[in-house]
Image (spheres, grey):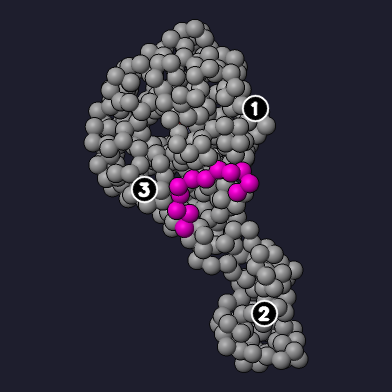
Amino acid sequence: MLHDPNRVYVFDTTLRDGEQVPGCQLTTPEKIEIARELEALGVDIIEAGFPISSPGDFQSVVEISKAVKNPTVCALTRANKGDIDAAVESLRYAKHPRIHTGIGSSDMHIKNKFNSTREEILVRAVEAVKYAKKSVEDIEFYAEDAGRADVHYLAQMIEAVIEAGATVVNIPDTNGYCLPDQYGQKIKFLKENVKNIDKAIISVHCHNDLGLATANSIAGLQNGARQIEGTINGIGERAGNTSIEEVVMILKTHQVLGLHTNINTRNFYELSRMVSSQMRMPVQPNKAIVGSNAFAHSSGIHQDGFLKNRENYEIIRPEDVGFPNASIVLTARSGRHALKFHLERLGINLNKEELGDAYHRFLTLADNKLDINDDDLLLLMTGDNMYVQSVQKR
Ligand code: KIV
Ligand code: ZN
């Protein structure tokens, strides 16, 4: 079982749940390229696809299995033999194969999706795990829509699938419904009430419909889960999945939680941009950790504080996530300190009076131009008021 009780396993599903986003489909070579970068990032498990869903998805799982050696390669199935057979076949070259099988666990799904009963669903769950276990040792079971499932039934299901051979039990908040406290309590309940729970790792798989995916994942980890599932940039169905970069950096920043991963955080930025460009899915500028503004300081008060000591306004060092560098953006809200910083960077040193004069002209310019770059500053410093006046009012 687990050697280090504080180690959190990172399960990346960018190539499966992430790739389900309309317009984000990738070719097999593109998926291989991302899978190699995920290996370099240090993820423990790569969910490479849903092999029964299409020949292309099947082939991607085959090729990714050949391309990576350290991470476990995982294939998704529903709880039926056809899906499981396809997954087993697609994983034949994987050094560490895993089958991810499962079924709905909420009454909503049991009635309205499967037109079935709790009893029948339990039997199907156990049969699927037993069947998969005949071919692959490492079996992860997902209890779909666990976020809305009755916790007593969920506990019964989890106990039965562990008994049948599941090594990881995934408790998805499929619809991003839970509050962090509710989700954390659900994990705690399973930890305390499923009698064979120590034979499996609990995994958290959260969606972001209410913007709570990261908070819910952390709540799950605080209550005993030791695997977190997510995607790079948080891409995924509807509002997306948990952002792996957010969870990992939360654990690194809040060491008081006592949890750690094996992730090379310096690879985050580059991988984020690769996923964004290959999937044609821009990263919102204010996205935590990897957004283009994540380390940009623009108001005068913040810039002044940052220049005095970066830790005044920086809780993560940009270099720790591979971000090019923190930036002091010059806008009409910037103060003298920020202007001085940029002028000195360009080799221009001014006394107090000269700086006051330059700042006055800078403000006129900044009121009329959105972004002030180095060329603007150099022209500003020629003392050419014509330039300042010639800039069109936006
Ligand atoms: O969100 C979900 O429930 C899933 C399962 C298939 C694991 O993606
Ligand atoms: Zn999902």
Image point 46% across, 24% down: which residue? 199
For this rendering, which residue is in front, 90 or 247? 247
Say if residue 334 shows up in the picture.
no
Name the quadrant containing residue 355. Answer: bottom right
Q: Nearer the viewer, mark 2 or mark 3?
A: 3
Above or below 374: residue 103 = above
Q: Residue type at mark 2: give it.
A: Leu
Residue position for label 2: 339
Question: What SS does tag 3 mark?
Answer: helix
Q: Position of residue 327 (x, y in %)?
A: 59, 69
Quadrant for the C terminus in the image: bottom right
Q: Is residue 261 magenta?
A: yes
Name the quadrant containing residue 73. Answer: top left
Left or right, residue 88 beside residue 280:
left
Q: Residue type at mark 1: give it.
A: Gln
Q: Residue type at mark 3: give it.
A: Glu
Q: Considering only order in the chain, which callout, 3 or 2, is on the residue closer to the N terminus?
A: 3
Image point 65% across, 68% down: which residue? 310
Say if residue 140 shows up in the picture.
yes
Range of the magenta residues? 255-266
Tag of residue 185 = 1
Q: Is residue 345 magenta?
A: no
Say if mark 2 contacts mark 3, CB within 8 Å.
Answer: no
Separation (CA) of disc 2 from disc 1: 50 Å
Question: What SS does tag 2 mark?
Answer: helix
Residue position for label 3: 39
